[in-house]
Amino acid sequence: MQISNRIKTMDQSPIRKLVPYAVDAKRRGIEVFHVNIGQPDIKTPQRVLDAIRNIPTDIIAYGPSEGLTSYRNALPSYYNIQGISVTPEDILVTTAGSEALIFAFMALCDPGDEIIVPEPYYANINAFAKMAGVKLVPIRTHIEDGFALPEVQAFEDAVTERTKAIKICNPNNPTGAVYSRSRIEELAELVKRRGLFFLADEVYREFVYDGKTHTSLLNIPGIEEHVVVADSISKRYSACGARVGALVSRNHDFLAGVLKMAQARLCPPTVEQIAAEAAVSLDASYYQETLAEYDRRRHAVYDVLKDVPGVLCKKPEGAFYIIARLPVEDAEDFAAFMLRDFSYQGKTVMVSPAQGFYATPGAGADEIRIAYVLDADKMRTAMDILVRGLEAYRSR
């Protein structure tokens, strides 16, 4: 018997493939600083935890396939804080942002259709595309200019008769780039002219630094029917395990189509939606304080890496990731070395090799992604260990 070719051709997660090395390091008594994955150590808001502890029901029952009515009715107030005007009818609740993207790929594309996406991109997009039978067409961005979106002509040239959508992640995981409104408006004109969908992962919209602003596709006039936004509570509320996301679109034919798939999986998690609804009433100060904390962590990383000889990185503008080019040929081998062969004062660091975030063969082979999800003191310690490990690796 044979398993499907779909499974055979799916790649292992580049974020998690080095986990066995980390497990072994811990078994040997080494403390591992995990900056390989976007799991923040910021505490989940107390009102979210209290909502879980005090669930107002005796039965955890199935909910509506499109999400709890009370939660969908509450969500527009959250978006309003972000300057985005939507109605409950524009929202379909999903089991995390991952399901939102899978549903979007499957609703927008038939097997063999194409989605254009700037690279490097969130690695699990590869798996989502395989599950949906979608071909990803990468548009290269570069570390030298902070991974800014290239000229719109690069996207135009990539459009074929099988192209169904352009997808962006803004602010970007894994690069930390925040895309300019002018470039997004140029892409908006392209999708409108070519009859494409414009899909955006906006999970990190609260995390934008240095006075920059985030441009939501939902605020670009004239392309309302083209826009699909994937969202999640995981990062903004430090609730990665809650698995509550959403698709937001004013294209109600699209949402009606997605609802068919949502009905097949019955409903998103009821308990976690109750918790997510409690978070909606958090005021602006919560987001301001959280942003300030990530800004401290950002500086703890960037202020060290920018001065390391041979290392190239740009100051992240958003999210909580940074990609650094190292003076090594194989960043994955270096990442394994840090876990397998190196420690300093009984500690080491786990990073993500960046090659897994690219589709172009060989791209990113000398780059790593760091998630600054630990407090600033721990991030400074982790960067000190990383620099010492890099010196030891190069001197072998």
Image (tube, helix red, strand yellow):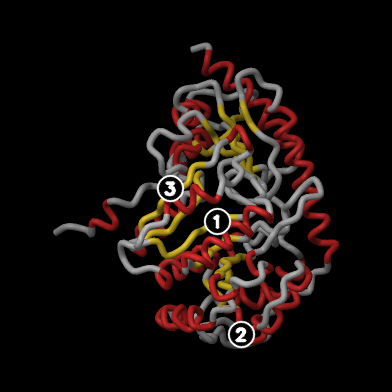
Element assignment for label 2: helix
Query: x%, y% of residue 169?
Result: 58, 55
Residue occupying the point 52% across, 39% down: 352
* Residue on which the image places disc 3: 13
Quarter of the picture holding the N terminus: bottom left
Looking at the picture, tell me which residue is in the foreground, 347 or 387.
387
Q: Quadrant of residue 299?
A: top right
The reply to whether residue 125 is in sight is yes
* Number of numbered markers: 3
Estimate how packed mark 1 is, as few (under 14), some (14 to 19) or many (20 or more) residues with alpha carbons within 10 Å.
Answer: many
Horizontal relation, residue 258 to residue 237: left or right: left
Q: Is residue 80 left or right of residue 322?
A: right
Q: Are marks 1 and 2 in contact (CB under 8 Å)?
A: no
* Secondary element at image label 1: strand
Residue at 57%, 87% (x, y): give it.
Answer: 59
Q: Which residue is mark 1?
A: 168
Residue behind mark 2 = 89
Amino acid type, callout 3: Ser
Q: Earlier in the sequence, mark 1 or mark 3?
A: 3
* Three-letter code for the amino acid on which mark 1 is drawn: Ile
Q: Nearer the viewer, mark 1 or mark 2?
A: 1
